[in-house]
Amino acid sequence: MNIMGVLLAVAVVGGTGLLIGLFLGVAAIKFKVEVDEKEEAVLAALPGNNCGGCGFPGCSGLAAAIAKGEAPVNACPVGGEPVGEVIAGIMGVEAGESVRMTAYVQCQGDCDKTTLDYEYHGIEDCRMLSFVPNGGAKSCNYGCLGFGSCVKACPFDAIHVEKGVAVVDKEKCKACGKCVAVCPKNLITLIPYDAKYVVACSSREKGPVTMKECSVGCIGCQLCKKNCPSQAVEVADFNATIDHGKCTGCGACASKCPRKSIVAH
């Protein structure tokens, strides 16, 4: 074996490796992406659900926005106040007051309380019901369809269909808003976790029509509004709404409602 050939081969390979190493070193310095340490720390503090409930594309998007001052430190609905306080410490600011929210399905027209126009047999997806007569088998065109598109969308197992109506477990709910976005009837809203009373109907039909369609539907009689001592109830389009900021939880609206459309939360 020619020793000079071996040495030459070693030199060529070694030289090539050295040149590649130098090239990669220079490239790493030249094209180095600066990492925001605060952004990394915020991302580590976030729960990592990537639910999008904050309005940003996942936890990394929210972390970047918080680091840039484009989002509040308590913007994560899943982490809530505890995570907000941790992130506030990272950013060196006050966390501020946050209100825990939860999803609520504004309907209680289950199998026993609402009437049907016909028997439906088909794809069990609420979003597909817009293509069938009257938007579904239930007589009330505003009511929950009960096929669980919201259930499939919830990443926290916080919503289930019971007797044809979706019901939220507020202890599990993280207020990510995915159920709100997927409901084709716009029945699901985010309300304060501590809300005392809620209007469990979203019908905008006139009273006589609602009375035929559902035994617990709001008919817009305004007795709740007239009897509320804190002026927290308004009625528009034959449907009552409660201002939770004004509501004192006295229960006068619920006790006076002849249809039991207002219930404790």
Image (tube, rainbow, N blue to C red):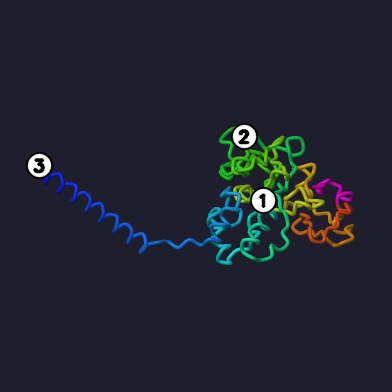
The residue positioned 79% from the left and 57% from the top of the image is 242
Residue at the outermost left position: 2
Mark 2 Cα shell of 10 Å, populated few (<14), some (14-19), many (≥20): some
Label 1 SS? loop
For the record, the magenta segment spans: 254-265
Q: Which residue is mark 1?
A: 175
Q: Which residue is mark 3?
A: 2
The location of residue 88, given as percent across then percent down, is 65, 61
| Spatial separation of the CA atoms under disc 1 and disc 3 | 76 Å
Q: Nearer the viewer, residue 102 or 49?
A: 49
Q: Which residue is mark 2?
A: 120
Of circles 2 and 3, the one toward us is 3
Q: Amino acid at mark 3?
A: Asn
The location of residue 42, given as percent across then percent down, is 58, 57
Q: Is residue 178 left or right of residue 213?
A: left
Label 2 SS? loop
The residue positioned 60% from the left and 53% from the top of the image is 45
Please check the rendered image and state whether residue 209 is part of the magenta-colored stretch, yes or no.
no
Up-down: is 124 above or below 227? above
Q: Nearer the viewer, residue 250 or 185?
A: 250
Q: Amino acid at mark 1?
A: Ala
